[in-house]
Image (cartoon, grey):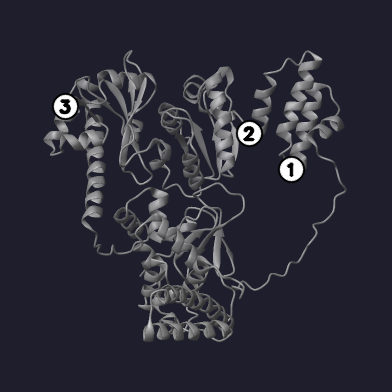
Amino acid sequence: ARADIVQVVSSYLPLTKRGQRYWGLCPFHNEKTASFSVSGDMNLYHCFGCKAGGNVVQFVMEMERMTFPEALAHLAKQLHMPLPELTMNPEAQQEATRRERLYALNREAAAYYHANLWTAKGETALAYLRKRGVDDSTIRRFGLGVSADEWTDLCDHLRAQGYQDDELVEAGIVRDREGRRYDAFRGRLMFPIQNMYGNVLGFGARALGNDNPKYLNTGDTPVFNKRYNLYATNLLRRQRDLKQLFLVEGYMDVIALSQHGIQGAVATLGTSLTQEQARLMKRLAPTVWIAYDGDEAGQAATERAIDILEAEQMNVRVLRFPDNLDPDDMLRQRGVDAFRAVRPISSLAFKLERMERGYDLTGEEGRTEFAKAAAVLLKNVADPVVLENHLKALAIKTGFSRDVLLAQVGVRQRPQAGPINVRVRHAPNRPTREATDDSAAEKTLLTLSALGYLPEGMIVEEDFEVPLYRETARKLMDGMRPPQILSEAETPEDVSILSEIFSKELDLGREDALVAAEDCLRVLHRRHIDKRLTALRAQMESAQGEERQRVLSEIMTLSKKIAQAQGGWTNGKDVM
């Protein structure tokens, strides 16, 4: 049995079938037109935009930032398939073991911090959580804990569990200063950060006293990078058909929403929202309600987050609470019913209201400048109803007529008309006889071979000059399938090149495919002849007697072959 790549990929992003392939928006770069192709027959994917490509295991490796063994184990678990035995080179095995040790180490640290919370070491932290209204079940759900206000408390515990100092430093929970090892987090409330599958990647840590900074986070490690993760996604993995997410600023905001029965909250990890985090959210739900703090810093961060999320084609709305409260304070001071009563506004309305605060609308100059600036934002509004509503509101605020504002936006109203259907007939997707790019010819032959168009023996290794293509041709002739060839590729660049070759669609019948192959072989045949002629002419300079006659005879024979180039295909080995 093998993992169905269409099933796997469609669990991450919507796919639409066109012809024999499935298409969607690439999860690895921003795009508005689908260029991401998935082939169920070939069991591979390729993006014709950013050139990412590979087989189903490589797709999971990229999406989940996993090693090959981790991705394989993940697929086996998700699809309820037996895990195949792996044969890994020593370096890959060492890397897999290293990552598993770091996961286990972080899991042990999280358990230790959590156990501390219920002892004398955790009195201050537990009192703080009680003051914030966090109950015991929520504490356990999020695995909250406390780091002792001691230099080597965790370090000593993990050493006793058999972990080495170098591992503790690599995990980011112990620091090394001139050979002296000590705990990175001391006297802090601890928030374990997990990925969607429950692996503890690192920690957030809040000071319980007056220590600065107020919050610390694990630095980048082999298993953790703040850019690629969000707080509390592990609680959302099993929620099917999640309609929306709440994006909040802090760990305590996520915890407060969860305790009050509001699911779907996530937070960034002490940094501004990143494109990678936006893509992670898109996998969980199609809509995001941003509920950042009400102060200026929070509102500015909201505006930046809107741009990042909308670049990923997400539906974005904004929650604004009275008196500039943050979500946690809103719930504690006003209650869950008041929280739910707050209705979100559109991202455009939020931007316009923020923009308005920068102008003095009591004066004509301020109203004029605001109208011009608002018109720039409205230029990108495609929905005529939404545009009309904003124009009416803007007219009231500025005193300009709706028609004047519309002219400033740059949109001229036109009579409504039905769509114009234009039929375009595409020429057959077939290499032309005029194509003379040797590399393109080799690629096309590999595509035709992978698609099963070529009869046995039509191509041989010697037809291919590029080492990667020659090796790929050999594997195809040995009966190896494209996904297996991709799994053996030595570099990411090779994976990208080969996935593009195997993903190329050629709408050909068998007869046309053979003609295309002959065209390509003719190009390669000519290349072999040209190279041989160059070598022979070099020999002519020093050849004498019978040797010179033999070289001259071969030159004449090859020249005649060039003149007869309209003939059928010939293997390169026959020329040599």
What residue is shown at x 28% (from left), y 64% (from top)? 84
Camera-side residue of 540 and 45:
540
Q: Position of residue 575 (x, y in %)?
A: 44, 83
Q: Amino acid at mark 2?
A: Ser
**60 horizontally vs 175: left or right:** right
Of pointers 2 and 3, the one earlier in the residue sequence: 3
Kind of residue at badge 1 = Asp
Q: Mark 3: which amino acid?
A: Gly
Q: Callout 2: 10 Å neighbours few (<14), some, many (20+)?
A: many
Q: Which residue is mark 2?
A: 347
Q: Quadrant of residue 385?
A: top right
Name which quarter of the figure residue 230 lies in: top left
Viewer-side residue, 483 vs 100: 483
Q: Quadrant of the N terminus?
A: bottom left
Q: Would residue 70 appear left or right of 338 to someone viewing this image?
A: left
Q: Nearer the viewer, mark 1 or mark 3?
A: 3
**Residue 15 placement (x, y as % from top left):** 55, 58
Task: Name the element at disc 3.
Answer: loop
Q: Earlier in the sequence, mark 1 or mark 2?
A: 2
Q: Which residue is mark 3?
A: 179
Q: Residue at x 52, y 27 (%)?
A: 292
Circle 1 residue:
383
